[in-house]
Amino acid sequence: MEKAYKLLAGQEGISNRAAKDLIDRGVVYSGGKKVVVARGEMSGDSSFKIEKIAKIKTIFEDDFIVAVDKPAFVTSEEVALEKKLPLLHRLDKETSGVLLLTKDDEFRKKAVDAFKKHEVLKEYIAIVEGRVAEAVTINAPIITIKKGSTAHSRISSDGKEAISHIEPLMIEGKRTKVKVTIETGRTHQIRVHLKSIAAPIQGDTEYGGRPYKRMMLHASKIELLGYSFQSKEPEDFTRFVL
């Protein structure tokens, strides 16, 4: 038996650190199952498959703003580092879709103010567990507990206002593709709100979803200060019914 990241490093001819990073990102599989613990013990003859991470694509750029299509398994901070620009907002690591950065400090101040005043339209697509047959608005305050580099949120009367509008798009078996429009941007808001109606996001094991290759949440559209940006659904969303 040997630690998973060391076995992966040997198979791929990469450093232990690089191997651990791949496992932590959630893109390493062995025997058809995702390897989730880099330091977990595995058989010495284990073989691994690494899912390819898509490249960061620029959707739009001018003197004030840059909109990119962030792939899953890449952090928002890594996008900011690559573009050498500050973020206007963040997406979770496994969430794909439109992410905004700014090139102008005055524009950044206006954008931050627009976010605070709920003047930004944010639409997401999610594939959730269960059958969501009717549209529903969830108005439930959220409190977030941060510990180190991690955060966990829950609905609480002591939390901050959080409003999400859920609209079913397609039902297939015991899963539903939904559009989620949020008026506020609390940490893990969509994930918490969908869990509250017994419709956790597929792959979101932290908030009740069953294990899957990724958390099935995609930031499809954002509008602010006269700009509008969209990102096409990834292939695993468009092939939902197959």
Image (cartoon, grey):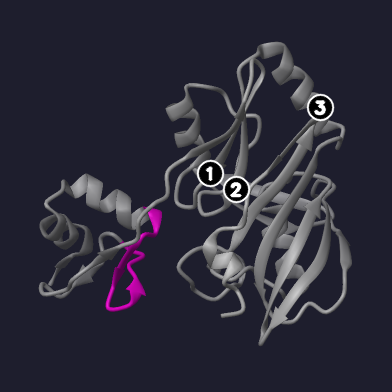
The amino acid type, in three-letter code, at marker 1 is Lys
Mark 3 lies on a secondary structure that is: loop
- Closer to the camera in the image, 141 or 139: 139
Quarter of the image that includes the N terminus: bottom left
Magenta stretch contains residue 165: no
Mark 1 lies on a secondary structure that is: strand
Q: Position of residue 205 (x, y in %)?
A: 54, 68
Magenta stretch contains residue 34: yes
Splitting the image into 4 quarters, where does residue 132 fall? bottom right
Q: Residue at x 33, y 77 (%)?
A: 32
Q: Which residue is mark 3?
A: 225
The image shows residue 88, relative to residue 42, as above or below, that is: above
* Mark 1 → mark 2, Cα distance in angstroms: 5 Å
Magenta segment: 25-37
Q: Residue at x 11, y 52 (%)?
A: 13
Q: Is residue 204 visible?
A: no
Query: Crowdedness of circle 1 by 10 Å Cα count: few (<14), some, many (20+)?
Result: many
The amino acid type, in three-letter code, at marker 3 is Leu
Q: Which residue is mark 1?
A: 70
- Closer to the camera in the image, 125 or 14: 125
- Closer to the camera in the image, 134 or 203: 134
Quarter of the image that includes the C terminus: bottom right
Q: Which residue is mark 2?
A: 97
The amino acid type, in three-letter code, at marker 2 is Gly
Query: Which comes before the other along the chain, label 3 or label 1?
Result: 1
Query: Crowdedness of circle 3 by 10 Å Cα count: few (<14), some, many (20+)?
Result: few
